[in-house]
């Protein structure tokens, strides 16, 4: 039986990490886990409970709420994708709105939130055959991942992609507001005290500013093939 891999994909927001990771998971018949969706689900829960305000967040309230938050990913045969469920509710669309995007970086900086999410992510990946994307997968969650990718793209390309994605979902959004949000998220992700966004020493950089999904798939197929061949030759 062929050895299954853990593939970790990190990088900046709106680089297309999820689209890329999903395509890899489909091709390999692996489980896809969107770690960012887990933090977004926690953020959505906290917003609903009034634990987040424009000027402050209720840290103690968030800590206490963690035991009430249950997140899992359920495969939807109609879409062919895994979708995010929060406490038995499908929240895949709601966690992508701009309000959640504005607060998710702050919530992800709460140590207890990160600790709990990392625990859940490691539980999911224990049997391998997993593609997981986020901002600290290769450095913190799976430092021994078989393949580590660090994705990047120009800020304008990322803002345009995010703008088109939200417009296609019927949301009224402003391009400059999206660009501001992405810029702020970059700053918050890179400077946070706990698990800041950074490239793992053994990760391969993928700048997909001018690459289609199929271009990226051709690129990753070569890396996966090399990894599997190296394993067979040991």
Image (cartoon, rainbow, N blue to C red):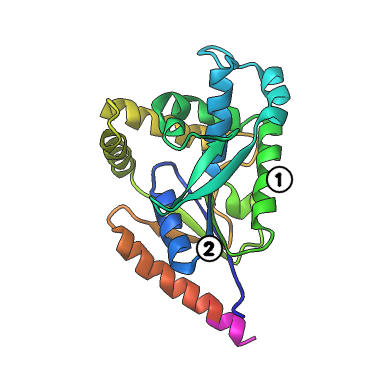
Q: Which residue is mark 2?
A: 30
Q: Is residue 101 above or below residue 199?
A: above
The quarter holding residue 97 reads: top left
Q: On the picture, is 90 further left or further right than 121? A: left
Instruction: Return the x and y of residue 222 as percentages of the image width and height.
Output: 42, 74
Residue 175 is a magenta residue: no
Q: Are marks 2 and 1 in contact (CB under 8 Å)?
A: no
Name the quadrant of the C terminus. bottom right
Instruction: Return the x and y of residue 76 as percentages of the image width and height.
Output: 45, 49
Q: On the picture, is 43 further left or further right than 121? A: left
For the residues labelled 2 and 1, the Cα–Cα distance comes to 20 Å
- The span shown in magenta is 229-234
SS type, badge 2: loop
Name the quadrant of the N terminus. bottom right
Is residue 190 visible to us here? no
Q: Label the magenta part by its dominant secondary structure.
A: helix
The quarter holding residue 2 reads: bottom right
Residues 142 and 85: in front is 85
Residue, x 65% and y 40% (percent of image)?
117
Q: Which mark is residue 119?
A: 1
Q: Which mark is residue 158?
A: none
Residue, x 40% and y 27% (percent of image)?
98
SS type, badge 1: helix
Instruction: Return the x and y of residue 221 as percentages of the image width and height.
Output: 42, 72
Q: Earlier in the sequence, mark 2 or mark 1?
A: 2
Q: Is residue 104 above or below residue 119?
A: above
Is residue 179 visible to us here? yes
Residue 230 is a magenta residue: yes
Q: Residues within 10 Å of mark 1 (few under 14, many from 20)?
A: few
């Amino acid at each position: 039986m062929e050895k299954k891999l853990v593939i970790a994909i990190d990088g900046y927001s709106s680089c297309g990490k999820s689209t890329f990771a999903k395509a890899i998971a489909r091709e390999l018949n692996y489980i896809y886990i969107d770690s960012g969706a887990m933090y977004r689900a926690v953020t959505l829960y906290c917003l609903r409970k009034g634990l987040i305000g424009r000027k402050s967040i209720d840290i103690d309230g968030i800590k206490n709420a963690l035991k009430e938050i249950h997140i899992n990913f359920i495969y939807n045969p109609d879409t062919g994708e895994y979708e995010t469920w929060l406490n038995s509710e499908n929240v895949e669309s709601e966690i992508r709105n701009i309000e959640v995007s504005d607060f998710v970086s702050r919530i992800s900086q709460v140590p207890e939130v990160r600790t709990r999410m990392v625990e859940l992510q490691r539980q999911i990946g224990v049997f391998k055959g997993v593609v997981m994307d986020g901002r600290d997968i290769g450095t913190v969650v799976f430092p021994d991942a078989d393949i580590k990718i660090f994705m990047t793209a120009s800020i304008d390309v990322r803002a345009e992609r995010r703008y088109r994605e939200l417009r296609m979902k019927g949301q009224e959004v402003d391009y400059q507001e999206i660009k501001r949000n992405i810029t702020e998220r970059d700053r918050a992700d890179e400077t946070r005290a706990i698990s800041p966004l950074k490239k793992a020493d053994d990760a391969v950089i993928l700048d997909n500013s001018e690459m289609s999904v199929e271009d990226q798939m051709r690129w990753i197929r070569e890396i996966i093939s090399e990894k599997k061949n190296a394993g067979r030759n040991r």
